[in-house]
Amino acid sequence: MRSLKGKIVTPRGIIEGEIFFDQKIRKIEKRKVRTSKLILPGFIDLHIHGGGGRDLMEGGDAARTISKIHAQNGTTSYLATVATGAEVALEQALIGIKQSIDHRDYGEAFILGIHLEGPYINNEKLGAQPRRTREFNLSEIEKLHGIVPISIITLAPELLSDLEIIKLLVEMGISVQLGHTNASYEQADQALQAGAKSFTHLYNAMSGLHHRSPGAVGAALAQAEFAELILDFVHVHPGACRSALRAIPKLYFVTDATAATGMPDGDYKLGVQVVHKCQNGVRLADGTLAGSCLTMQQVFKNALSLGLGIEEVSRRCSLYPAELIGVKNRGKLAVRSYADIVVMNEEYNVADVYLEGEHV
């Protein structure tokens, strides 16, 4: 059995002491220790497209590289996020992801499922998504869900023929997020009432807030319990981040990472699109933001810079994402939870990572 000493972030607060674990956490003891290390639950990122020069839509072994680079930055589990594409392209991507799940190797973050970002989205709010959208197709969902379970689907509710579709997806165990949408406030609110639970990259690629036409953003701020936010201060101004934090109880943070994450400036792929990384941003040739080059380690630091406390930042990087997708044994340092652990130094840099107790 392993153990770590430091300031341990638990659901009941920060405890100075020692945590004991093998594959799962066995015991947490409170005691005085001579270390300033911060021991946190591993980060859970529900929106990753790529990293290390690889994109999940490539299929094959792309997920292996992506899982390793994000694990090194504290992400112990994530949802493999696939962009809008032809049905055969989505199938090939999921087959590659399944192979990586079934034959996971040392140092690879755990893939908890799929985030299907499209193809049932609005052409008026594509962002960096390709123009390959289509009407909702249940048989397509069932086929993809049979390859790798879909944990989250992003869709535009105004394009659905019947909101009963949302109830059906929820019954399948899929969390519905509203995104890439031009929905009115009323349409977004009705979708929430039908069972939609969250919003994809809040503020971005959705109908904005106007005091006489609140749009999807207004519905999120007024009605949502969950929403994801890309915390790079490029996608969303810090002031808008603070507004969302005050309004949405379980706002959680994501990277929306692309192949450019962990790589030098240059050109990379995001699905079928070519994107360009320059300093801290990733964009299409026309300047449209196209995902990010973020890691969760940087997200954690950015959240602290907003004035949030360590415990709250941890919840928004680990616990709330787990709760959204119904994962009860990750995202927290508690007895019988998996020992997915991040150790940070005084500068809030990742010093050590444990994946189900295995040191990376």
Image (tube, rainbow, N blue to C red):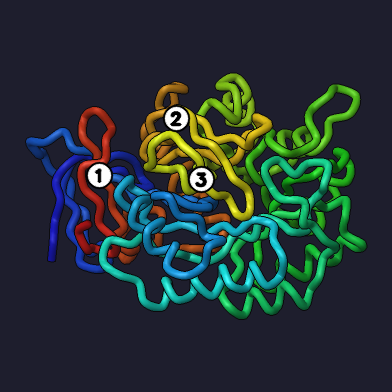
What's the residue type where badge 1 is placed?
A: Ile
Q: Residue at x 33, y 64 (%)?
A: 338
Query: Percent from the top left, x then y, of residue 294?
Result: 45, 38
Numbered mark located on residue 39 in the image: 1
Query: Percent from the top left, x then y, of residue 317?
Result: 45, 44
Query: Percent from the top left, x then y, of residue 76?
Result: 36, 55
Q: Answer above or below: position of 1 versus 276.
A: below
Residue at image mark 2 = 303
Circles 3 and 1: CB atoms closer than 8 Å: no
Q: Answer above or below: position of 106 versus 299.
A: below
Q: What element carries label 3?
A: strand
Q: In which quarter of the image is the N terminus?
A: bottom left
Q: Which residue is drawn at 69% across and 48% down?
A: 129
Task: Choose between 209 and 328: the one closer to the eye.
Answer: 209
- Give the Cα distance between marks 1 and 2: 17 Å
Q: Quadrant of the C terminus?
A: bottom left
Q: Can residue 329 be seen in this view?
A: no
- Give the Cα distance between marks 3 and 1: 34 Å
- Give the Cα distance between marks 2 and 3: 27 Å
Residue at image mark 3 = 268
